[in-house]
């Protein structure tokens, strides 16, 4: 029986214990199947990062959606062209009508977009599109690769589109939980998960409201018993404050970085207790 993205929408935000489907064995190494590689013609992610930071801005346009008012930019360098999302939001106080959550400390910042990308890569997850920060037209913001031919999970669910590899998808949902727990992202919804159903691709976007200073895990858990891939397990076990500070010190506060490490330790304990975290070297 074919499964649809409408089912995934339910699985994505309403975790259910005891789902039968499990990933096929343990994965590891450079060819991790859960990773969604998108390089826009560049040779590797480092090359793409440099392109996003330095390429000429050919055009910029309002997207017309999103409370943070992101813009889509077209970038060109050495005859190579890519599109990206440019976000400049930088809010540290709750504004009336801006958020429906009551929080004593609320932030919505473009720097969190690159921080989420870096945490994703430090953990070996590979589902956040390549993201950097740069200045465009005198404004500093995040520049994240635009995923061509992708649609929102909401759209895929509305159209009841078919899923190719359900096991792979379930593993990615576990990795989404790990990332969101690490960065304390409680703003995950059907519009900030992008999919390309014909290629079984899934990308995680829109993390400018993450990185709370709360030193506990978010309340929503991924309760399916889906083993964590070796590479991600190693990232979770070995990541330390020193590495976090070296990678995120220009993007987050020290309190935010310490909170990430506190949540990492809790996440390792939780996944170990459930027998889902391999003991990797």
Image (cartoon, rainbow, N blue to C red):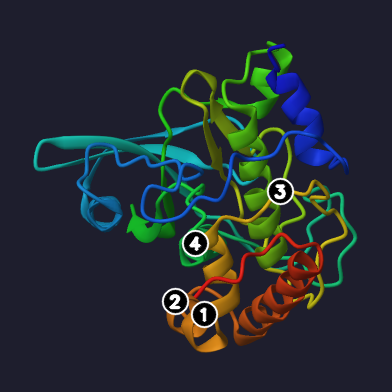
Secondary element at image label 3: loop
Q: Give the mark nearest the N terminus, 4 or 1.
A: 4
Locate residue 127, reporting x and y percent: 51, 47
The quadrant where residue 148 appears: top left
Q: How far is the residue under mark 2 from the one under mark 4?
A: 19 Å
Distance CA(mark 3)–CA(mark 1): 26 Å
Instruction: State yes or no: discs 2 and 1 in contact (Cβ < 8 Å).
Output: yes
Between 8 and 102, the one nearer to me in the picture: 8
Picture quadrant where residue 41 is located: top left
Disc 1, SS: helix
SS at circle 2: helix
**10 Å neighbourhood of mark 2: few (<14), some, or many (≥20)?**
some
Q: Is residue 138 visible?
A: no
Please tell me whether mark 4 sits on a helix, a strand or a loop. helix
Per the rendering, the mark at residue 247 is 2
Nearest to the eye among marks 3 and 1: give it.
3
Name the spot of residue 188 as percent of width and height, x first.
72, 46
Q: Which mark is residue 244?
A: 1
Q: Is residue 260 left or right of residue 243?
A: right
Q: Which mark is residue 226?
A: 3
Q: Residue at horizontal 53%, vertical 57%? A: 113
Give whichever of discs 2 and 4 has the lower sequence position: 4
The location of residue 210, given as percent across then percent down, is 67, 61
Instruction: Tell me the tag on residue 231.
Output: 4
* In the image: residue 43, left or right of residue 34: left
């Amino acid at each position: 029986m074919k499964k649809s993205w409408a089912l995934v929408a339910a699985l994505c935000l309403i975790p259910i214990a005891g789902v039968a489907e499990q990933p096929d064995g343990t994965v590891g190494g450079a060819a991790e199947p859960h990773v969604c590689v998108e390089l826009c013609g560049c040779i590797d992610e480092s090359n793409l990062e440099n392109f996003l930071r330095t390429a000429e801005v050919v055009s910029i346009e309002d997207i017309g959606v999103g409370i943070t008012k992101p813009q889509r930019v077209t970038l060109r360098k050495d005859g190579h062209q890519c599109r990206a999302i440019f976000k400049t939001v930088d809010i540290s106080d709750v504004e009336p009508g801006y958020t429906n959550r009551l929080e004593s400390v609320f932030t919505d910042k473009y720097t969190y977009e690159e921080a989420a990308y870096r945490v994703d890569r430090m953990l070996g997850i590979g589902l956040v599109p390549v993201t950097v920060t740069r200045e465009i037209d005198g404004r500093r913001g995040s520049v994240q690769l635009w995923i061509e031919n992708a649609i929102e999970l909401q759209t895929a669910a509305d159209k009841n589109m078919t899923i190719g590899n359900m096991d792979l998808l379930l593993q990615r949902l576990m990795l989404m939980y790990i990332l969101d727990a690490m960065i304390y992202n409680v703003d995950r919804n059907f519009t900030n998960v992008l999919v390309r159903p014909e290629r079984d691709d899934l990308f995680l976007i829109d993390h400018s409201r993450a990185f709370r200073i709360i030193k506990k895990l978010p309340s929503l858990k991924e309760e399916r018993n889906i083993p964590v891939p070796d590479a991600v397990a190693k990232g979770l076990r070995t990541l330390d404050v020193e590495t976090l500070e070296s990678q995120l010190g220009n993007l987050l506060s020290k309190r935010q970085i310490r909170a990430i490490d506190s949540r990492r330790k809790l996440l390792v304990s939780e996944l170990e207790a459930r027998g889902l975290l391999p003991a990797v070297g």
